[in-house]
Structures are given as C-alpha cells and as structure tokens.
C-alpha cells in the first residue's frame, strides 16, 4: 500500500501542529530539552478536554506559564502523543477573548446588555430563580444540557434539586442511534472509545467514518498500525476522504443509501453462506428470519439505489468474508444522519455478527468487566426520587432525557412545563438542528444559565453567564477508562485560574449552599474529594498525580476463549439477528430500507464532517488552529463548479430548500466529491463579534439544517436531509 505511519499522521493532523514535538516520546523530548540551557520547568499531568477522547497529557510550565503540552506515554488514549488540537490546548487557556467574569443579562434574550457581577450576585440570582421554578412547576421543570467533564458536578446538583432531566448532545445528535442499534443486537454498545481492534485487523470497513479527519488520537494510531501491517481497507463515502486515499476500495455511495448497501452485503453473505457458521450457530438467533427478509435486497437492486455496481457489492462482500473474523466494521460516531439511523446501526451490528467479529481479535473486543467506579464521597444523603418521568419523548429507546424532547417540551409544555435550562459546555446554536426552534424554546424559559469558557453566540440567549476555568486550570473528577483494561487518569490544575474564572466543582458547591443542598457537597474541595475516594479504592492520590494515569492491565479479557465465553445482554441471551423486542414495540425486527428524499433539480444534499484541526465550534477561535484552518470551505464537484461558472476560492452563499441562507463560504472545486452533494466542516460561521478570530469565518452548516428526521426508536435528529443551492456572492 506504500503508506508509512509518518505519511498518514502528516495528513491527519496527528503530527501537523506537533512535528518534532508530539511525535517524540515524552522522556526523549525532556532529555533533549535538558541539553539546552533553559529556565527551570515543571511538568504536570492532566488529561485533554479539547475533544472527548480525553488523552493523558503532560504540561510543561515555565515561569507560571504553560509552554508546551505533550502526550503521556502510559495513557491508552494518547499513547505518548497528542493530536494537533491537543498540542494547541494552551490556545484555550490564553485566549484573550475568554469569558472573564460572571455576567447578568439586563437586556433581552438574544439582544443582551451585559452587567459584570460578582460570583455571589450571579449565584444568588440563579438560586432564587431555581427556587421559584421548583415552587411553581416542580423540580423537573429545570433541565441540563451538558457536554464535557465538568458537567458531572452540574448533573449531581440537578439530581439533588430533584430533576433527572439531564441531556447530552452526544446521544440524540451523535452516538445514540448506533449505540441503540448495537444494544438491541448484542446487548452492548460499541463503546466510547470504540472497542475495536483496528491495530490487529485484517480488514477495516469505514462507512462514512472519515478517520484521520475525524481525529481521535489512539484510534487514528490504531488505524495507521492496522493498515501499515497490511489490513485491507474499504471506505464507503460520497467524498474521497483522507481515509479513502489509503483504501483498497472506495465506494462513492449515493448519500442516504448506506442501508441498501448493508442489506445487500448481508444478502450476499447469507445466501452464499459466507458467514461464520460455527459462531452464528453457537451465539446467534434469527438467521432464518434474517435470510427471508434480506432476500429482496439483491446486489442488482442495491446497485440502482446506491450507484455502486452490483459486481462491486458482491466482490466486496466476499472479500470481507474472506478475512473473517478479524474484520472491523467501524460503528461510526456521529450517526444522526437520516432518521433511520438506529436501524442502520443495527444492520452494521448484524454484519459484524455474521463475520463472527464481535469478541474476536482484529474485530470488536470486550471491555474489562471491572466496574472501576470510584465510590462516592462518604455520607452523601440519598438523592430525592423524581416525581415525574424524564423527558424521553415517546421514543422507547431514549434511555435518558434527550435534547430533542427537552426542546420540544419546552415549546409545547407537554407533558409538563420546562422553565429552566442549565447549559454546560455546549454551543446550543450549533449543536441542535433548526435554530429557530431552539430560539422559540429559549424565549419560553424563566431561566437560562450558560457555563462556558468562550463567548460563542449561544451566550447571547442567557440570563446569566458563568466563566468556567479551562481544563488546564482545574480539578475535575477522576477519569475512569474502560478499554481492554481499567485505568484511572487525573485532571489537576496546571496553572491557577485566570481572571475570575472558577472550576465547576467550586461553582456548584457554592450554588448548592445558596439552594440549601450543601449536604450533597460536603467535601472541602476537589482535591480532598478525589483523595478520599481514591484512597478508599486503594489507589494512591500522590502516585496518580505523579504518573497521570494508572492502568490495571490484568483486568483485560478482550476476546472469546474457552474460559472467556461471551455474555449477551439481550432478552434471548444471544446475538439477535431478528429482534422480538423490536417487533413487540412496533418496529421492524430486521432492518428494512426506505429510500430517502433525493435533492430536487438545482439542489445538492448538504453533508458535513470534521477537520483534524477542530472540534465542532469550540476550537474555531484558537489562535494556532485558526492559523492552520481558519475557515471551512465548500467541497463541490469540479464539473458542477464549471457548469455553474464557479472558480476555486470564490465566495458563495448557500440557500436551503426552506429559504435559509448561510454566511459566505469559499468554493473548493474538486474531483473528490460526487455531483449530487456538497460538503463542509461543521462548527464554523460563528456570529459572535466577541470572537476575534472566528467571527463570520466560513459558513454555519447548522443554519442550513432547518429540517431533521427524528429516529422513531430513540429520538435522534437525522441532519443530512437538507438540500442547498448555490447563490453567487454579489
Ligand atoms: P461545540 O460547538 O464545540 O460542541 O456539540 P457541542 O458540544 O455543543 O460547543 C462547545 C461549547 O463548549 C463552546 O461554547 C465552548 O466554548 C464550550 N467549552 C469548551 N470547553 C469548555 C470547558 O472546559 N468548560 C465549559 N463550561 N465550556 C467549554 C457537539 C455535538 O454537535 C455533537 S457531540 C455532535 S456529534 C453533533 N455534531 C454535529 C455535526 O457534525 N453537524 C451538525 N450540523 N450538528 C452537529 N451537532 C452535534
Ligand atoms: Fe485532545 Fe486530540 Fe486527544 Fe482529543 S484526540 S483529547 S483533542 S489530544
């Protein structure tokens, strides 16, 4: 294949911002530093929060300033390296645009007038409003939307207050559909980090997963290891992604038809009896029902739907079966695409099962069975039982309250009023589709609190803004990692909080006092909290601080062996190729294909993805990352660009089927995308003028996502159902 590890890392950004730094093991770079006379440095262990892979990091501090971040060698998420974003983490800490003091909005929501206030004033205001909401409507009328490690303190406060309406975009806008699809099939989700053994795989299938552009550190390293060792790679993507550039097969699928391809692959594997017969015989049920259902999905039929030749569908099905069971069907991560996403996840799980890959080397591994939870701080009172059910909507597989139901209920008041939103670490204008609906909900609330580090556009809708200390300035709870084996990692302050920012543990503890809930937060500070709990678990606090990460490799039993038989948490205790549970709830027991709406003439389907240099919107104002990738561009087929008279680099505006317009975006005319869709990186087009670097740079995909298709099983919001036309800039 001719790809070296170094080449790939260069493309994917894992080496880009860190050339000669992050690629060098920590101890070597420290030795190299030691050869030059320099001011005395201290090194502090923590873990990264620039994305949620939470890689173990070491911060080098000179004169009280963080001057460099590197990967912890002993941490399984980093394996001694950070990605470009992790290396640039100081950009968050030293961003001059940071939120600096608590602020009250004395103007209107959406047209704020900010008054700087003390912490005492801000927290007294919130406590007063929350008491009133509880008295008038009940505690469930306050909901939390949270994304990030510090959100755990807000969740504890919410539960102590009496509401369980904790929501996270990582469910309905991200991994929820695939997790439910796998849960129904195997009785377990594929995990986060995904429990896939790519480094030892013989065959890797990526369906819309643009690994390398979507950069999760150790996963990209494992992917590179796998293909460097000769794993075959098959990429299904309407766009010739970086990963497609390394693939043996690139299938440029018509967007929205992945289910048809999956069902046709299953058809071939079942009909030609290419599946792992012993494994299926022993561990699975429902093969006959599956076979009967997929009989209609022939490769010839799928070719019409997917635009992939029937012969290619047959050849690739045979090829992946040839390498079974060491095959990774990557489960994907952001899977809220078309509204049938849980069933697509299920089709991927069924394919995985047929190949015998679940619990096999080079396929999916089992995480450690160790619970690994660190006991709560002693003598915390029992939490009150919520009186009303959570906001799970009418979706039976919404395992927890969802952002989708939270927003809809806030607007409708059904089944009960929602009057307060606590927003932790989530730019709600960019997270959820249909910004008008988000604004409609925000206008109905009695209280909106935003806890953030940066003034992204969503703060304009808050009544109170609380400036959190960045991850380099604070303690958070211990990170318990449950990959092949168990590990604990620590986050501790590398430097003291700047401005008047405070860590969430402090904010929540102070707020709890004002709300009469201090009994739930009895510890002196987070250091004492962690130390007490770690020592009760037999782990030395000092050792963890020093090492950063402590692993327990003896807890690993990742693959099926004679003395490690798998357990499946399904009703039947087997892998369910046919699901009676789904049938009983009124859903298809075996996935079916429904053709999605196709773009009308003159329109393109809008698809979006990631850059290795950014995480959603949160990094767009980072000085180093903005320098490397300051605005997103519009991938458009070169032929279409020519027929529309558009040149590379020219600015255009997009208008969707409902008349919503984007900010201007540069055209990237390329052979690397199909003609029926356009693509951009998510997270740009920020509208807050307080962002020196990110303001008005590139286009906001979310402003064009006015329509979304709700997943009937779990309430996910499929967002790839919008069509755009190109309007030339005047
Ligand atoms: P961001 O846009 O990065 O992502 O949605 P979000 O998690 O909302 O917003 C993060 C916010 O957290 C920013 O305001 C940032 O300043 C703040 N922040 C960063 N660090 C900290 C911190 O330490 N403390 C606090 N308090 N705040 C902090 C992501 C969500 O979006 C997800 S998970 C997915 S997978 C979906 N992706 C996606 C997509 O690809 N396209 C479209 N159109 N929509 C999407 N929505 C979903
Ligand atoms: Fe940080 Fe990169 Fe790791 Fe994400 S993958 S936690 S941004 S180093």
Image (cartoon, helix red, strand yellow):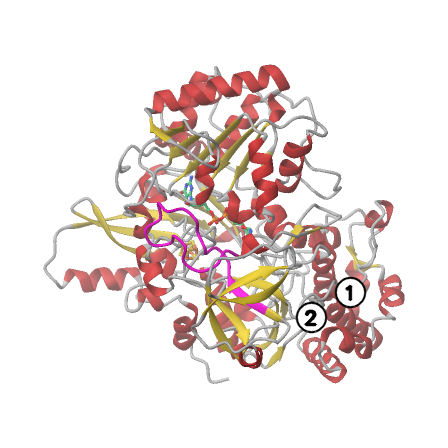
- Side of 112 relative to 593 (left or right): left
Q: Assess mark 1: CB under 8 A from ligand 1? A: no
Q: Residues within 10 Å of mark 2 (few under 14, many from 20)?
A: few
Identify the mark at residue 595; answer none if there is no mark: 1
Instruction: Note whether 397 is above or below 574 in the view shown.
Output: above
- Magenta segment, which residues? 678-700
User: Quarter of the image holding residue 64?
Assistant: top left
User: Mostly what secondary structure, the magenta segment?
Assistant: loop
Magenta stretch: residue 344 in it? no
Q: Residue at x 88, y 62 (%)?
A: 289
Secondary-structure class at tag 1: loop
- Side of 321 relative to 729 (left or right): right
Which residue is identified by label 2? 601
Q: Nearer the viewer, mark 2 or mark 1?
A: 2
- Side of 343 relative to 221 (left or right): right
Nearest to the observer: residue 338 or residue 675 = 675
Q: Residue 336's x, y, as percent? A: 64, 54
């Amino acid at each position: 294949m001719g790809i070296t590890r170094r080449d790939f890392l260069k493309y994917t950004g894992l080496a880009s911002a860190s050339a000669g730094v992050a690629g060098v093991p920590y101890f070597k770079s420290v030795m190299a530093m030691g050869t030059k006379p320099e001011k005395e440095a201290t090194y502090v262990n923590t873990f990264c929060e620039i994305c949620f892979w939470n890689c173990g990091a070491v911060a080098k501090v000179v004169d009280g300033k963080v001057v460099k971040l590197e990967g912890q060698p002993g941490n399984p998420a980093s394996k001694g390296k950070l990605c470009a974003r992790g290396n640039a983490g100081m950009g968050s800490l030293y961003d001059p645009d940071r939120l600096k003091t608590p602020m009250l909005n004395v103007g209107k929501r959406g047209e704020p007038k900010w008054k700087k206030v003390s912490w005492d004033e801000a927290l007294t205001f919130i406590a007063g409003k929350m008491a009133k909401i509880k008295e008038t409507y009940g505690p469930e009328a306050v909901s939390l939307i949270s994304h990030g490690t510090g959100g755990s303190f807000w969740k504890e406060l919410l539960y102590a207050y009496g509401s369980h309406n904790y929501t996270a975009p990582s469910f309905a806008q991200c991994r929820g559909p695939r997790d439910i699809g796998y849960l129904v099939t195997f009785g377990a989700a594929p995990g986060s980090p995904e429990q896939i053994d790519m480094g030892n795989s013989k065959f890797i299938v990526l369906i819309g997963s643009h690994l390398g552009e979507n950069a999760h550190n150790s996963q990209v390293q494992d992917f590179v290891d796998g293909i460097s060792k000769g794993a075959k790679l098959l990429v299904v993507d309407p766009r010739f992604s970086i990963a497609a550039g390394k693939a043996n097969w690139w299938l440029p699928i018509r967007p929205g038809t992945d289910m048809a391809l999956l069902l046709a692959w299953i058809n071939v594997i079942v009909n030609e009896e290419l599946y792992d017969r012993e494994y299926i015989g022993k561990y699975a049920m429902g093969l006959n029902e599956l076979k009967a259902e997929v009989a209609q999905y022939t490769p010839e039929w799928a070719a019409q739907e997917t635009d992939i030749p029937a012969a290619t569908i047959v050849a690739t099905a045979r090829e992946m079966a040839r390498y079974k069971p060491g095959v990774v069907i990557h489960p994907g991560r952001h899977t809220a695409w078309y509204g049938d996403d849980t069933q697509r996840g299920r089709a991927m799980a069924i394919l995985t099962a047929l190949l015998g890959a679940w619990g096999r080397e080079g396929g999916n591994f089992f995480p450690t069975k160790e619970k690994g939870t660190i006991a709560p701080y002693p003598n915390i009172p029992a939490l009150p039982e919520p009186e009303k059910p959570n906001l799970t909507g009418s979706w039976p597989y919404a395992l927890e309250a969802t952002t989708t139901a939270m927003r809809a209920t806030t607007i409708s008041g059904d089944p009960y009023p929602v009057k307060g939103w606590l927003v932790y670490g989530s730019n709600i204008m960019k997270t959820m589709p249909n910004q008008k609906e988000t604004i409609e909900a925000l206008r109905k609330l009695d209280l909106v609190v935003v806890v953030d580090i940066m003034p992204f556009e969503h703060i304009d809708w808050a009544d109170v803004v609380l400036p959190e200390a960045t991850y380099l300035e604070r303690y958070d709870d211990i990170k318990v990692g449950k990959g092949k084996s168990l590990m604990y990692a620590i986050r501790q302050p590398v430097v003291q909080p700047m401005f008047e920012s405070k860590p969430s543990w402090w904010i929540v503890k102070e707020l709890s006092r004002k709300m009469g809930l201090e009994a739930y937060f009895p510890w002196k500070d987070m250091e004492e909290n962690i130390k007490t709990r770690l020592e009760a678990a037999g782990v030395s606090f000092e050792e963890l601080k020093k090492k950063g990460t402590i692993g327990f490799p003896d807890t690993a039993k990742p693959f099926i062996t004679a003395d490690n038989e798998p357990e499946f948490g399904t009703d039947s205790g087997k892998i369910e190729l046919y699901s009676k549970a789904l049938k009983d709830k009124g859903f298809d027991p075996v996935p079916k294909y429904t053709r999605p709406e196709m773009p009308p003439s003159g329109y393109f389907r809008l698809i979006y993805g990631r850059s290795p240099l950014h995480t959603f919107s949160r990094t767009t104002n980072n000085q180093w990352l903005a320098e490397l990738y300051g605005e997103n561009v519009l991938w458009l087929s070169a032929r279409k660009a020519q027929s529309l008279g558009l040149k590379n680099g020219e600015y255009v505006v997009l208008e969707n089927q409902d008349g919503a317009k984007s900010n201007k975006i540069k055209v990237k005319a390329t052979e690397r995308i199909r003609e029926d869709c356009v693509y951009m990186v998510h997270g740009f087009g920020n509208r807050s003028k307080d962002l020196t670097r990110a303001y008005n740079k590139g286009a906001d995909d979310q402003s064009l996502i006015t329509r979304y298709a709700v997943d009937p099983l779990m309430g996910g919001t499929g967002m790839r159902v919008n069509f755009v036309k190109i309007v030339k800039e005047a």
